[in-house]
Amino acid sequence: MTHSKVYPDAAVPRRAQPSKARQDGLLAYLLMSPALLYLLVVMAVPFLWALYTSFTDKTIGAPAHFIGLQNYLSLLTDPGFWQAVRNTLLFTAGAVIAKVIFGMAMALVLNQNIRFRNFFRVLLFLPWTIPSIVSVFTWQWLYSDVGGVLSDLLMRLHLIESPLPWLASPSLAMFSVILVNVWRGVPFVGIAVLAGLQSISHDQHEAAMIDGAGMLARFRHITLPGVREVTLLTAVITTIWTLNDFEIIWLLTRGGPANATQVLSTLSYTEGFLNLHIGKAIAIAVVTLPALIWLINYVTRRSLSDSNPAH
Amino acid sequence: MNRILLSLTALTVSLTATAHAQSGQITFWMKKQLSDDQNTMIQQRALEFGKQNNVKVNVELIAYENFFPKWSAAIESGNVPDVSFFGYQEIGQFYAQGVLRDVSPLVKSIQKTNGLMQNSLQKPVTFNGGQYGVPFWGEAQVLYYRKDLLAKAGFKVPPRTWAEFRTMAKKLTGGGVYGAGLGFGKGNSDAEFLTRAILWSYGGSLNPAAQITATPNVQATNLLRDLFVTDKSTPPSALGWDDSGNNKAYLSGQAAMVFNSGSIVNVLKNDYPDLYANTGIAALPSGPKGNAIPGISNYLGIFKASKNVPLAEKFISYLTEKNWYGDWIKRGAPINIPVYTSLASDPVWQTPYTKPFIDSVKSFKFLGYPQVYKPADGEIYNLRLVNDAFQSMMSGSSSVADGLSTLQKKVQDANK
């Protein structure tokens, strides 16, 4: 039996320790360097460059001149910007709340032992798999007042007398774009919550039933605490995606009518690519960064801290 | 996020374009046409040019809405296509940025070989004596009307004035049919042009900006507001229509009168023969100050940063060679209007379905009218400031006075 090659740290000869530590450190840096290089080239440099550009008067094709906070100050006095901020908050809050509620409901139903459960699971997750462009054009047709299903259905039910201007009325358009975002986003929440539900032991439910707990009591005291973490995490991730959503609004309304659905992402695109004012467009995007960084930080802390034993 | 995407695209474009410069290739960005025949012809023509000049011509057919991100990335990276399509409003914007080449000598040489081009199409891309785009085709908006429905309502001829248009639209509305298929979606380019046409015909305009709230604009806006709000002669979803909205409304029988470029004619002819027979086409109605037709013109241009300028010029000359061009333009008639004056007399333009288009070219009025078109007018158009204001007024969100006042402020800001 030989123990000579297995030294506890304290037993390593004193002179060999720094050299080995240095070698380990170098090796660690070497192994990390591709990832660091990638982060530097793909993330850090463009981000810092973009941040700098937001402090310039950069337009497409013209050199940038440093103008300090002028882009940000002009945004603060622009009513269009504030309308976009309000719309962004409304769009995000409305869509996320609806996605969490319907996603939870969907997961609860699909967790039951119903017939054709797998078929329904596939069916309900389908919206998530369809490309945005296809689903947006389909919704455009659903909303149409010529052969559009939604208005036709409501008219047949005698709920309305004439087709509704789903995307043409400032008061309805925001609801309409939120509906499409919710339709697309519910499956993601549903999948995540369903995974959480499946980790809850049946024994807990059975024990509670024996103790006389009703359906609502079991939901409140067993199901909800069991999926609380995953729901919270999913809601935050969905919030990040919804804050950044561009395609649905751009393809359905372009921010109209009368800027009723203009959000920060569409305003930034308009300013940058149609108006060629890249500096101002980036300033608009940068405004959302503190909220996004806070949310991303929350997600990474929440999802990584417990699972990584090194911390 | 957009910036990152832009940078990556720029990098890709940069690498691709560098490779092209080294291997005797040129790149041509062309707007994708509705006619497949025309798209194929462009590709074949490029292939022939390549063979004759021992170079490879890469043709990219691009949907209009995708051009801006591509142009932006190309300009920023310095690796631009050698020849590109532009609308006149973009020529103005890019001229202001100083990124386009003056192609006056090329236009002169093309005209010397092939004959004169429509003067009206050259004006909006001429700045300080230089011309920054070679006219390639024009487009015009006309009035499409249902002859059968008009006759049934007791009208023998289409509306000649905007006041008549309102009266007729009101009478034609009913039973699921709307008299006026006017769309005002935020991205709708037809609406941006048509609204100006109505303002101009009332003696109004967006220039000078300080007079946007003046009486002629108020009168024209009131007419539109009456159509939408008072008479309800427009379909309920019209305020959200994109450029295809009026096409769909007319083809589905929802609208009795619409304004559009030539795109409806070809669809009618091929797919709706009965409706085609019942369709009449006329010039836009007049206002108290006459008739104003908004010009829509398209060009080929060369960026200053192009690495193959002589080849690019040669390629443009090749594409505008009159015989081939005449054949190409005919396949797109009446959407694409020829730029050579001599081609206007071709029999294809002498039918009731095509003549109103070719007749429009001479009296084209451009963004910025009654003043000369300037880059800021292109910016106002691209931002759809007019659509924004009119959506707001037509939906009842703001009064005509408030809506025009807001528009005036925004136009003044854009002109600063």
Image: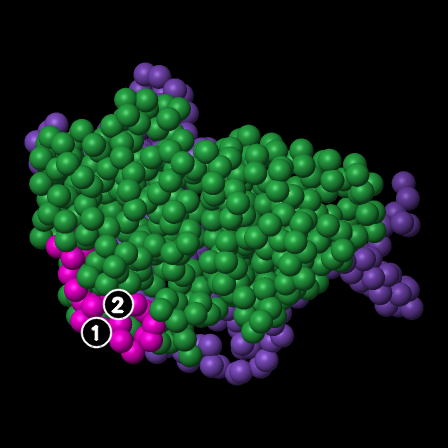
Q: Is residue B356 above or below residue A59?
A: above
* Image: magenta residue range: B203-227
Q: Which chain is purple?
A: A
Tell me where residue A243 sits by quadrant: bottom left
Nearest the camera: B285 or B181?
B285
Q: For the residue labelled by badge 1, is the local secondary structure a helix, a strand or a loop?
A: loop
Q: Earlier in the sequence, mark 1 or mark 2?
A: 2
In the rendered structure, the residue with mark 2 lies on which chain?
A: B
Q: Tell me residue B95's x, y (percent).
A: 57, 67
The residue under label 2 is B204
In-image side of A144 versus B157 (left or right): right
**Image position of B152 (left or right of B12):** left
Q: Amino acid at mark 2?
A: Gly
Q: Colour of chain B?
A: green
Residue B215: within the magenta? yes
Q: Nearer the viewer, residue B4 or B218?
A: B218
> In the picture shown, does residue A235 fall above or below A47?
above
Question: Residue B14 at x, y = what percent?
Answer: 71, 55
Q: Nearer the viewer, residue A232 or B24?
A: B24
Chain ID for label 1? B
Q: Is residue A181 at least partly visible in the picture? A: no
